[in-house]
Amino acid sequence: MPKTRQAWMIMTIVVAVVGSVWAMLNRVPVELQNPSGRPPAPQAGHLAPDFTLTMEDGEQIALSDFRGTPVVLNFWATWCGPCRAEMPAFESIWRESDGQVQFIGVNVQESAAQVSAFATGLGISYPLPLDPNAAIARVYRVRAFPTTLFIDEQGVIQEMILGQVNEPSLDANVSNLLEN
């Protein structure tokens, strides 16, 4: 224990310097900070958990590839009637947005051949990555098909809809993403 004023001052300065160095070394770069301030979670107001999946052609796609662009993330399956019903509206708005909004349709537990034939039959051209083991669906806590998330350009989930998205709701949520 320091006994003199000078010893206390030296100890205070050492602690301040060590603390400052520790703080500088442990800083998180701005590009890695979470804009929502909350941990990644599959719910509105939280950063969308990142993932990397493979497309039917073997190309890799990551959610973080689209940071800076709003994303409509849809979990679906070929056997799902409501999924089939909403996909033409997704395709139409995706084409009309001309790159201002990205649509990603994550197919859960089906083969590349099934997805490719399905997409060709419906004329779907937005990315349809494969989640063969439902690993990403589990991360996002998908309980039913379809499940759609509207994610802003910072990667924060703005809305999550369980079940078929009707066109007025789709238009409103996409407009919301573009206004923010």
Image (cartoon, rainbow, N blue to C red):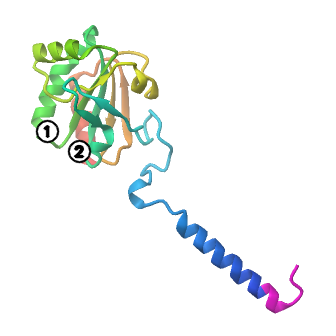
Image coordinates for residue 139, horizontal then vertical, percent: 45, 28
Task: Specify whether 12 is left or right of 80.
Answer: right
Mark sitting on residue 129: none
The amino acid type of the residue labelled 1 equals: Ser
Circle 1 residue: 97
Q: Which residues are magenta?
A: 1-8
**Within the magenta stretch, is there residue 13?**
no
Locate the N terminus by quadrant: bottom right
Q: Are marks 1 and 2 in contact (CB under 8 Å)?
A: yes
Q: 10 Å neighbourhood of mark 1: few (<14), some, or many (≥20)?
A: few
Task: Specify whether 38 is left or right of 2.
Answer: left
Image coordinates for residue 6, horizontal then vertical, percent: 80, 92
- Residue depicted at x 28% and y 28%: 54
The amino acid type of the residue labelled 2 equals: Leu
Q: Is residue 68 above or below residue 62?
A: below
- Residue depicted at x 39% and y 15%: 144
Image coordinates for residue 82, horizontal then vertical, percent: 27, 12
Circle 2 residue: 178
